[in-house]
Image (tube, coloured by chain):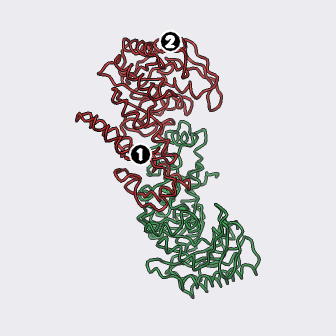
Chain colours: A green, B red
Amino acid sequence: MPVGTQATVKAVSPEDLYEIGSSIILANTYHLYLRPGHEIIKQLGGLHPFMNWGRSILTDSGGFQVYSLSKLRTVSEKGVVFQSHIDGSRHFIGPEEAIDIQSSLGADIIMTFDHVVPYPSDYETVLQSVELTTSWALRSLERKSNEKQSLFGIVQGGTFEDLREMSAKQLVDLGFDGYALGGLSVGEDKETRGRVIRETIPFLPENKPVYLMGVGKPEDILEAVFQGVDMFDCVMPTRNARNGSLFTSNGRLNIKNAGYADDQRPIDENCGCYTCTNYSRAYLRHLYLAREILSYRLNTIHNLAHYCRFMTDIRNAILEDGLVAFRSDFYEQRKFDCN
Amino acid sequence: MPVGTQATVKAVSPEDLYEIGSSIILANTYHLYLRPGHEIIKQLGGLHPFMNWGRSILTDSGGFQVYSLSKLRTVSEKGVVFQSHIDGSRHFIGPEEAIDIQSSLGADIIMTFDHVVPYPSDYETVLQSVELTTSWALRSLERKSNEKQSLFGIVQGGTFEDLREMSAKQLVDLGFDGYALGGLSVGEDKETRGRVIRETIPFLPENKPVYLMGVGKPEDILEAVFQGVDMFDCVMPTRNARNGSLFTSNGRLNIKNAGYADDQRPIDENCGCYTCTNYSRAYLRHLYLAREILSYRLNTIHNLAHYCRFMTDIRNAILEDGLVAFRSDFYEQRKFDCN
């Protein structure tokens, strides 16, 4: 799902996302709590009317961003005291506060406040993190009162098979509307990530969505779908777009390249997005080099349309029982991609 | 008309402009000549298909920007040798080159290459500039071969009444499709500008469009319309938008102000643009402070819609013979504006 850190998916409007076919976006609790503040958003009716978005929203709990963005964190059983990365002001968020903030924001899917540890961490550290995560998950469940919101638990456990199993089982015992795999895409290699996913998913219920947080590249998504993952979020399509790196059915293309200076073709001849329907590589290269604001939007529309179509194709392949053939085709089309 | 220096009106798409009601945009010959180059644009079918714009385009001749942006200019009877402000490379543009470049770009209205002098300049300097401008205007006419393009002459003459008269008469003798007032909005005071416009327009034919280049604020446009001006271009609506300065029927509003933090109202309750229809001041303030790309687009859509409606209102007032009353109302509505 497209990621909207500041109550907007960077560089595009809700209508752009509707046209692309996005059905859900992610908004970051940490960012919105600090700016403009969840109380203001609540006062204005919640995130949906605030940002003029008529489809689904998922908010993360803030746990990962408190860990990765803020300064001087102090973690206790109660929660986390941290300093804002914007102005250094002191704040406290615990599991109850995370639920309350997400209730004010009014997202459709909300997440438990999890305890995040660096990668790699030793067994003892990760064990404590799993225990804290489970205890916070329980408190999140107890705090939640908004019946319209679905609450997902976040499985931790680092790269340790038994800790992932423990975390998954404890969360499933508590009972959530969905389960996320946290603590991945944080620096571990691809094989390790694949192994952790493979070892964790059997302990999660088949009839609940499984959400792999922070992933990823198309090939990583495809491989995770094979393991049973249903949902993903990633900044890659939007961030790459702003850097001129565009996804095509044959791999990635860097719009800066001089070879595109007079190239009349669209980014991807197999793409029917607004950008590919109306603009040449030559024009998009020009806008990019001139640092025009429209460049960010047109590139983002294309990359998001590429990802949305990719997810639709995967869903269709699953429905038609053709995912294995879909994977072969996927790698075949990209065999000349050097990115 | 909205200004598109880099083959785009900053921060908005063609569809945004269609919805706003823009019927013509301005593109800068100097910028496009340097980047991506008029030859590439010609090869791709001209500016209209290149930038996906289906309505009218006016290109300036490059004269003003060679003067204001480039380094180390050497002016001769032949034309101007200058260094690119981007990479310092040396270039030559004379009246013939300006016509050829504009022919490659394929705009609907093109301008003669005029000779620009600093403000203020002494009588002798301005006299020479008028003579050169007329000689270049003649050569522009002789060079022009593209029958689909309309060519406007640019009246110079600084703030000297007799030189403006001389320049206007010489250009009218040559015969153009329209006449622009150049060398204004370059630092002179409002009264001087008003006087020059008033003293020049009687020498221009009533049945040809008169175009005041680089103006301006709504009140300046309104006053110039009273003098007989038909066309304007200015960066003000788009540049102000990107700086958070938004036009309303009661004057300007700075979206940064803390007072808008929880303000549910649109920018202007009398405005029906996309931005005012869908977003609150609170959200726009948040986007602006978060430096979100969408902020630039939403603010620009509003300011351009404001200007377009303003021009439509002026045209309607003229048709209904109510321009005097329109002006009274205009100042009445803005009497509390301190900007």
Residues B132 and B281: in front is: B281
Residue A34: image quadrant is bottom right
Relative to residue A120, is residue A332 drawn left or right?
Answer: left
How packed mark 2 is, by other alpha carbons closer than 10 Å (few <14, some 14-19, many 20 or more), is many
Q: Residue A68: horizontal and vertical position, in percent? A: 67, 66
Q: Which residue is pictured at 48% across the width and 14% down the height?
A: B130
Examine the rendering and report whether any part of residue B283 can be seen: yes
| Element at label 1 | strand
Image quadrant assignment for residue A291: top right
- Depth check: give the residue in front, B184 or B7: B184
Q: Residue furthest bottom?
A: A173
1 or 2: tag closer to the N-terminus: 2
Residue at screen point 62% across, 75% down:
A93
Seen at 47% across and 11% down, the residue is: B135
Q: Which of the 4 image quarters holds residue B90?
A: top right
Residue B172 rendering spot, x and y as whole percentages:
37, 14
Give the labeled residue for mark 2.
B127
**Image location (x, y in percent) of residue A159:** 70, 75
As drawn, the residue found furthest toward the left would be B320
Q: Amino acid at mark 1?
A: Gly
Is residue A302 among the parts visible in the rendering?
no
Indicate the chain on which mark 1 is placed. Answer: B
Q: Secondary structure at mark 2?
A: helix
- Vertical placement of B114 versus A121: above or below? above
Q: Amino acid at mark 2?
A: Leu
Q: Nearer the viewer, residue A70 or B181?
A: B181
Which chain does tag 2 point to?
B
